Image (cartoon, rainbow, N blue to C red):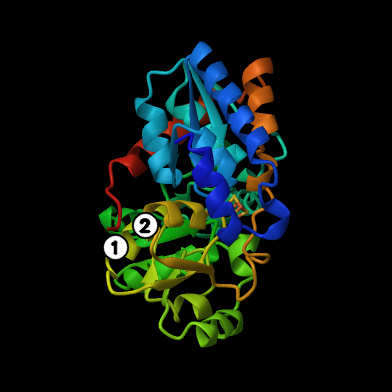
Amino acid sequence: MRDVESAVAVAEEAVPEHWRVTDSQSVSRSIARISTLARARHAVLLAHNYQLPEVQEASDFVGDSLGLSLEAQKTDADLIVFCGVHFMAESAKILNPAKTVLLPSLSAGCALADSITPESLLRWKERYPDHTVVTYINSSAEVKALSDICCTSANAVAVVRSLPASKILFTPDRNLGRWVARQVPEKEIVIYDGACPTHDVLRDASVEAARRAHPDAVIIAHPECREDVLAMADEVCSTSGMLAAVERHPEARTFLIATEWALIHQLKKRFPGRQFIPADGCIGCRLHCPYMKMITLEAVERSLRENVFEITVDPEDARLARRALDRMMAVPRDR
Ligand code: SF4
């Protein structure tokens, strides 16, 4: 990582105008300061694929929720600076109770995680007492603690298939839940009614418009997208799974990407000869997660300098959530 040239070059094509880097020298200096601070504090910087390109470049590891969870578990750093959203930093803390975990902005929440509370999950569990609860990692520690097992978009199908139970309560993302239910028809899957607004806003009509402009494009969609969008997709996978999906289409030059626009930074780095276009038919303005973009280089630098904001988890919630996360991490990726 820490390749500011790449961050700036990619930004010109893949990034909505408002978020483009306009002063590459200042970005370069900022990344250098962060690198020095991180070394001095023996810190590791983990960044989600939806982070700003320059934050991805400032980080040691960039990945999806499953990859970041695994990385958080094996790091020997004293300090984890989590460039992502709150539930991700919480998961890192649960997996590393002895380490300090910092989230550079407390405004980096997640609307999907907020769509389920411990109280609402308890009500659903009362209605479906015989069901095994599978909870997407995009949820609070308290909700994970009330769940039998977690999953990410990278292993949701494999997690549900791995369970001996035939009755599943899948929470909180209804689009991912429906996608899993179609892949695992032999199980009875009740689906909670939450959604990610960034993905749920995308409609097939917008993707159709983008496809008319690029008729030969391969469509790759995240399973948090609605059913009408997933029905148009050639590939449905997690953000890191999208990198592998591109490799499965060596003949294709153009890809429509139905997920948060910042992932395109990683795609363009990995496949410089290919064209990646946000599937919303505009410049990525619909597929934009405002929570992820709360983490700026300035916030990361402040986090390292001032030791903010430390993430803590109630010990009993952490113990039970850890059980659900450990079970999840024992299941391999869908593909
Ligand atoms: S993209 Fe959706 S699920 Fe991911 S952090 Fe943003 S609001 Fe949450």
Quarter holding residue 204: bottom right
| Circle 1 residue | 247
- Residue 243: image tag: 2
Real-space CA distance between mark 1 and mark 2, rounded to the nearest whole angstrom: 7 Å
Is 220 placed left or right of 164 in the picture? Answer: right
**Disc 2 within 8 angstroms of ligand 1 (CB):** no
| Rendered location of residue 164, percent (x, y) | 26, 54
Residue type at mark 1 is Glu
Is 10 placed left or right of 110 in the picture? Answer: left
Res. 266 in view: yes
Q: Residue at x 48, y 66 (%)?
A: 276
Answer above or below: position of 107 versus 125.
above
**Disc 1 within 8 angstroms of ligand 1 (CB):** no
Q: Residue furthest top?
A: 40
Answer above or below: position of 318 versus 223.
above
Q: Are marks 1 and 2 in contact (CB under 8 Å)?
A: yes
Answer above or below: position of 58 versus 166.
above
Q: Residue at x 66, y 47 (%)?
A: 21
